[in-house]
Image: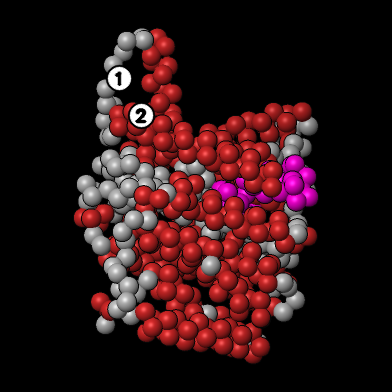
């Protein structure tokens, strides 16, 4: 039975799983006596499972064994077509929105972007908030599994910086995980990572409720932390009941988005004897320490001018607010600390939105749920720059391997990292131009482009002078943003790989 199911297309599995997940908000709405919402989710889930079963019966035994490129295409369909299925119960249950808004919401959740057209949380029933959280959580889990099942074997998603093979080409020189059949990689990855992912989510939820968060908001924040989606049912963790203790819990678990080595080494990435030697984790910790320090000194100088520098408690609160918010935006989660605005009140200076956009552009670790350029690519560019500076002093110097695979990163990975960085910059420019052509002003278009391409939706509420109301955007603008979110989640090199003719020969 399991062997028969494993031969079905991956996308069909994803559709069927989404149908099963619809019964969870249906059960929640039923327990809250919201019978209409419960029926919409129950009917939608039943319909999706029924149609998936019919398709599975129709194509059973008629398709050849899937290739890894087929699973890359399935991922693309998951981020573009699957939200149409996910939006169906959302649209039917809410009734007061358009299907384009529902589709935008589901794309945003599934890509772990977290941008929402519903700026007021009370507009949505609890079951719809729960559905948004589930979709975001499943999107994060899908990226965890895809890292080892698709991106690592094809040397994409950041693995191209350290892989021996060419980006987009199947690397058969890797470990056992890379040489296994495509569906076996998904099954093995699920067995290894689903318990870890679910267990960590449960741990965060329990701790947040212990510290005073309500069950629904605590669960939403727990799922958003693991998926780095920033989705909340109360407009942010600052409105939750867990307080600073809850922020401390989320801070610790956000560290999982700085490096794959915090939870798994199954992808064949650069290995280290310990986590502290991992370049991504070290670079992430450096930014989390350095940027808040600069912010703190800036605000401290401002506090001197207003004679508030002696307020030690406000200084500590400002320092914590900066550290938490920096880590949150670096991992492209987008949660704001409740103390983030204390720094502004303490010194009278505003907090720079440009800095938050810069952190989101850097992004988190390779093969995690974080978006952005990724820390490993930044590290590769740093090594290349270091080598070029050494050549300025000694033009004939031969730079050897510094250990830990850094020589390979500098010689070959830096070029690929630079190519990706340029493609990322071109994508930002293209999305900005499209949005301005559709009616947005330049500042708003730039913020929206960075927010979607880095999958950091909350940037739209903090980076511009005034929060951007996504609801008033036209339908075409929302569709452009949907495309940008998919591009940011899949990454440009993966999209180019799908367009390459070399991948479509049998």
Looking at the image, residue 326 lies above or below residue 185: above
Residue 45's disc number = none
In this view of the protein, which residue sits in the foreground, 132 or 453? 453
Q: Answer whether residue 445 is magenta in the image.
A: yes
Identified at 46% across, 51% down, the residue is 499
Q: Answer whether residue 273 is magenta in the image.
A: no
Q: Which residue is under mark 1?
A: 399
Identified at 29% across, 78% down, the residue is 61
In this view of the protein, which residue sits in the foreground, 41 or 192? 41
Q: Is residue 401 visible?
A: yes
Q: Which residue is under mark 2?
A: 410
| The image quarter in which residue 10 lies | bottom left
Q: Position of residue 64 (x, y in %)?
A: 29, 69
How packed is label 2: few (under 14 Cα within 10 Å), some, or many (20 or more)?
many
Identified at 58% across, 49% down, the residue is 453
Identified at 46% across, 74% down, the residue is 15
Looking at the image, residue 294 lies above or below residue 76: above
Q: Where is the C terminus found, in terms of image quarters? A: bottom left
| Magenta-drawn segment | 435-458
Q: Position of residue 505 (x, y in %)?
A: 34, 56
């Amino acid at each position: 039975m399991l062997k028969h199911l494993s031969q079905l297309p991956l996308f069909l599995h994803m559709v069927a799983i989404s149908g099963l997940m619809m019964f969870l908000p249906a059960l929640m709405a039923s327990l809250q006596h919201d019978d209409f919402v419960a029926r919409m989710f129950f009917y939608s889930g039943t319909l999706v499972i029924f149609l998936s079963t019919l398709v599975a019966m129709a194509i059973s035994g008629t398709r050849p064994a899937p290739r890894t490129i087929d699973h890359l295409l399935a991922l693309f369909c998951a981020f573009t077509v699957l939200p149409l299925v996910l939006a169906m119960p959302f649209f039917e249950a809410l009734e007061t929105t358009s299907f384009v808004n529902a589709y935008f919401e589901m794309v945003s959740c599934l890509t772990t972007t977290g941008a929402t057209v519903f700026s007021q949380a009370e507009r949505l029933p609890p079951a719809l908030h729960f559905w948004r959280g589930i979709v975001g959580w499943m999107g994060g889990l899908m990226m965890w599994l895809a890292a080892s099942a698709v991106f690592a074997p094809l040397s994409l998603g950041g693995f191209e910086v350290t892989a021996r093979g060419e980006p987009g080409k199947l690397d058969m020189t890797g470990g056992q995980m890379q040489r296994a059949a495509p569906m076996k990689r998904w099954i093995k990855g699920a067995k290894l990572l689903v318990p870890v992912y679910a267990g960590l989510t449960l741990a965060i939820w329990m701790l947040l409720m212990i510290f005073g968060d309500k069950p629904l908001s605590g669960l939403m924040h727990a799922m958003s932390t693991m998926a780095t989606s920033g989705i909340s049912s109360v407009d942010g963790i600052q409105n939750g009941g867990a307080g600073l203790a809850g922020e401390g819990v989320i801070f610790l678990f956000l560290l999982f988005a700085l490096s794959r080595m915090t939870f798994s080494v199954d992808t064949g990435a650069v290995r280290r004897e310990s986590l502290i030697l991992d370049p991504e984790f070290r670079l992430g910790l450096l930014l989390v320490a350095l940027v808040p320090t600069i912010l703190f000194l800036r605000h401290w100088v401002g506090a001197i001018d207003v004679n508030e520098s002696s307020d030690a408690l406000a200084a500590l609160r400002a320092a914590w607010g900066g550290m938490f918010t920096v880590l949150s935006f670096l991992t492209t989660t987008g949660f704001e600390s409740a103390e983030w605005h204390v720094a502004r009140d303490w010194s009278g200076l505003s907090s720079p939105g440009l800095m938050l956009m810069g952190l989101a552009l850097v992004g988190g670790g390779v093969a995690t749920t974080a978006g952005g350029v990724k820390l490993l690519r930044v590290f590769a560019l740093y090594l290349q720059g270091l080598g070029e500076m050494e050549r300025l002093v000694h033009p004939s110097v031969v730079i050897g391997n510094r250990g830990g695979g850094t020589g390979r990163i500098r010689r070959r990975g830096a070029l690929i990292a630079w190519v990706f960085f340029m493609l990322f910059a071109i994508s930002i420019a293209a999305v900005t131009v499209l949005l301005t052509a559709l009616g947005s002003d330049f500042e708003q278009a730039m913020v929206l482009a960075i927010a979607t391409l880095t999958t950091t939706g909350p940037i739209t509420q903090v980076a511009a002078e005034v929060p951007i109301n996504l609801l008033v955007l036209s339908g075409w603008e929302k569709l452009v943003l949907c495309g940008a979110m998919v591009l940011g989640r899949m990454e440009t090199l993966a999209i180019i790989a799908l367009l390459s003719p070399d991948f479509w020969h049998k």
